[in-house]
Amino acid sequence: MAGSIDRVQQAAASAGLGIEIRRMGGSTRTAEEAAVQCGCTVAQIIKSLIFQGESSGRLFLFLVSGTNQLDLAKAADLAGETLKRADPRHIRDETGFAIGGVAPIGHLIDIPAFADETLLRFDIVWAAAGAHDAVFSAEPASLIQAAKAKAVPLSA
């Protein structure tokens, strides 16, 4: 797992995003667990959701607040095809991250990314950093830029 965390740190540095990755004492796999560990609201947790194009097989990253649900119709419109949940093994093989530790940055592949614009209402958000217990905080606009994500309405 250290390799995944190192990739996140390197991606942040390459993007000019100063972060401090913290290993928490407990799991941060879910938004609720992460909020408890980070001492923030669930809404400030970024869920990094990966879906796969049904036709192309291509992976897409959607960054959504911990309290919001991804609107799959909006996501499919952005992807240009119908989406399905990607297999966890496929996600790990392609991105280098296991479910529960998928970060918004540091993927092994160039992945099309979209961020829910509601994240921009916060001063600070928290995201996974490559492992089930690793997180970092950042200013949302800077993180969205580092993730090369397009800020759009994504919530259901």
Image (cartoon, helix red, strand yellow):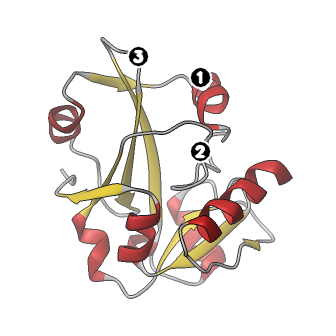
Q: Can residue 57 be spotted in the picture?
A: yes
Query: What residue do we see at 70% from left, 65% from top?
Result: 9
Query: What residue do we see at 44% from left, 44% from top?
Result: 49
Mark 3 element type: loop
The CA span between labels 1 and 3 is 10 Å
Q: Position of residue 124 (x, y in %)?
A: 45, 84
Viewer-closest of 46 and 143: 143
- As drawn, is 77 to the left or to the right of 89? left
Mark linked to residue 107: 2
Q: Amino acid at mark 1?
A: His
**Mark 3 residue crowding within 10 angstroms, few (<14) / some (14–19) / many (20+):** few
Q: Amino acid at mark 3?
A: Gly
Q: State which quadrant residue 135 falls in.
A: bottom right
Q: Which residue is mark 3?
A: 57
Q: Amino acid at mark 2?
A: His
Viewer-closest of 30 and 104: 104
